[in-house]
Amino acid sequence: MSPATVRPARRDDVPAVVAMVHELADFERAADSCHLTEQQLAAALFGPRPALFGHVAVDADDVPHGIALWHLNFSTWEGTHGIYLEDLYVRPQARGAGAGGALLAALAAECVARGYRRLDWVMLDWNPAAEFYAAIGANVIEGWLPYRLTGSALLRLAERSAPVRG
């Protein structure tokens, strides 16, 4: 496989990107939890006020074989935005050719060009990519634990909210 070329995702990439998100969910042993549709992704990436961004690694025929889906975060300590990498995935047949590194390098370049100071992501503790991430200089954030509210717990907490006055 030839070296990866990375470019911003386009509308015509949406079916391939959605397929890869579902492949990633399967790899992460959570296929039943992935409900992303082409309509949802197209709206998130290309709607009037996109809050999700994407890059694809493509082969010589411009066929996507890797994805990086990301959004902005903000560090109050740094006083600037950063990129939060939501999903990074390279199809098995394209692994080892540099697509993952090229996708991460593209996001690092976005950070530098925009004056952002952080590129953040989380991964499952069993993911073999840990060695790759360490090799590029990424650090595990010791002492920090990710938390998430979903489903009924999210609804219960929302019910405790007082109406927002405008």
Image (cartoon, rainbow, N blue to C red):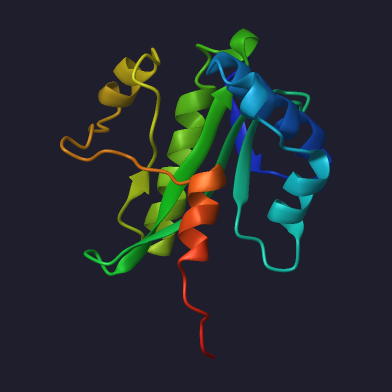
Side of 164 where 2 appears, left or right: right
Q: Residue at x 16, y 37 (%)?
A: 143
Q: Residue at x 30, y 16 (%)?
A: 131
Q: Is residue 82 visible?
A: yes
Q: 114 or 61, which lies in front? A: 114
Q: 156 or 61, which lies in front? A: 156
Side of 97 where 118 appears, left or right: left
Q: Is residue 118 above or below residue 51?
A: above
Q: Residue at x 33, y 67 (%)?
A: 80
Give the x, y percent position of residue 55. Answer: 61, 41
Give the x, y percent position of residue 81. Answer: 38, 63
Side of 102 where 24 appears, left or right: right
Identify the image quadrant of the C terminus.
bottom right
Residue 69, picture quadrant? top right
Q: Is residue 64 visible?
A: no
Residue 33, picture quadrant? top right
The residue lying furthest to the left in this view is: 143
Q: Residue at x 51, y 89 (%)?
A: 165
Give the x, y percent position of residue 40. Answer: 76, 47
Give the x, y percent position of residue 123. Answer: 40, 28
Q: Is residue 81 above or below residue 93?
A: below
The residue lying furthest to the bottom in this view is: 166
Side of 79 where 64 appears, left or right: right
Q: Is residue 2 above or below residue 88?
A: above
Identify the image quadrant of the N terminus.
top right
